[in-house]
Amino acid sequence: MGLAARVLEEAGLSTVVLTMTPEFHRAVGIPRVAAIEFPYGRPVGQAGDREGQRKVLLMTLSVLEKARAPGEIWPLPFTWPEEPKKADWQPPEMSPLIKLYLEEIKEARRREAEKEPNK
Amino acid sequence: MGQNEKKVDGFRFLPPGLKAWVRTFIPHEDFGGPIPWTPLSKPLSQTTISLVTTAGISLKSDPPFDMDREKREAVWGDRSFRMIPRGTTEKDIDVNHLHINTTYIKQDINVMLPLARMAEFEEERIIGRLAPSSYSFYGFQWKNTDFVEESIKPISEKMKREGVEAVLLTPA
């Protein structure tokens, strides 16, 4: 999505990306980021929560006016009401990509776990 | 760079294995290259805005995004896009995405593509106008940027024709 924002910005459009993973900015270089700690698939908020969605969107749109230089990340001050395990954002079936890379994913976890005790 | 207090952890909702794996793709250093920049040319209250999401939303009257091929070819993702007119509601759409739970978008399109909220902002003169068209493409593009030519450039041309000045992008 960062790449899409870059292409639109090059075409003369101002963009803001409302993202749950602002870390991707480090890989791509996103023009304007509003960062939100919400589960995947629901960046604007909970289903049916009109007021909550409005608050998120008003702050996100304000980044279009507030950002002064390319690459600014504006964290939004919202907290998802459920614990990550309860957020139920994952697909009902493991994605084809995850199935393909399952061993690599397990290996990455093992390596991370080995690093933990040294922290 | 952030001006607020909240620290957003982009990995908080990922299970530990995925979190460790995704981290291997993300550099530790800040992005060092040039970033394209179009400053907002007028106040929001006079700006025409369109929306783009990666959630794989299509109108029921259009072909759905292709999940069957991705199920056969795990690293292939549909590169096409769909136009979503303003006024579209959850009743009018299909949502196809193999990497998220699409249930909530089917309950309320605004969690992903906030067309109703933006129409309210237009009514309240918080924004100038919600453009006639918004867009969805499919966010799973694994090490492939063909979607830029096949989707994002045609989208940007259509936006220009509709007088769009700013774009809110919502990755799934």
Image: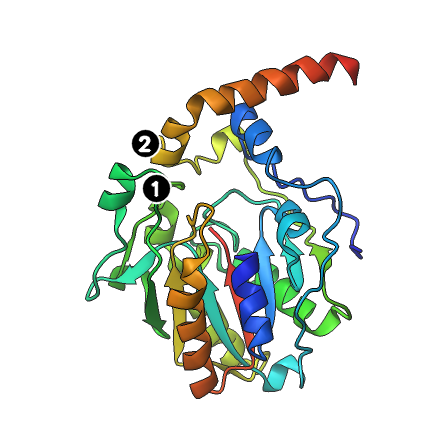
- Answer yes or no: is residue A113 visible: yes
Q: Residue at x 66, y 69 (%)?
A: B36
Q: Residue at x 55, y 30 (%)?
A: B21
Name the quadrant of the N terminus of chain B. Answer: bottom right
- Inspect the image, locate mark 1, and give the three-letter code of the amino acid beneath it: Leu
Is B130 or B159 nearer to us in this picture?
A: B159
Residue B70 falls in image quadrant: top left
> Is B8 positioned to the left or the right of B20 in the image?
right
User: Dot 2: what SS?
Assistant: loop
Q: Are marks 2 and 1 in contact (CB under 8 Å)?
A: yes
The answer to whether B69 is drawn above or below residue B109 in the figure is: above
Disc 1 target residue: B98
Q: How is the image coloured?
A: rainbow
- Chain name for mark 1: B
The x and y percentages for residue A111 are: 62, 18
Is B87 or B38 nearer to us in this picture?
A: B38
In the picture, the disc for residue B79 is none
- Chain name for mark 2: A
How many other residues sit within 10 Å of disc 2, few (<14), some (14-19) or many (≥20)? Answer: few
- Answer yes or no: is residue A51 visible: no
The x and y percentages for residue A71 are: 72, 61
Q: What is the spatial separation of the Cα atoms under label 2 and label 1, in whole angstroms?
A: 8 Å
How many other residues sit within 10 Å of disc 1, few (<14), some (14-19) or many (≥20)? Answer: many
> Is A20 positioned to the left or the right of A115 in the image?
left
- Tally the marks: 2
The answer to whether A81 is drawn above or below residue B155 in the figure is: above
The x and y percentages for residue A100 are: 38, 29
Disc 2 target residue: A93
> Is A85 positioned to the left or the right of B23 in the image?
left
The x and y percentages for residue A105 are: 50, 24
- Inspect the image, locate mark 2, and give the three-letter code of the amino acid beneath it: Glu
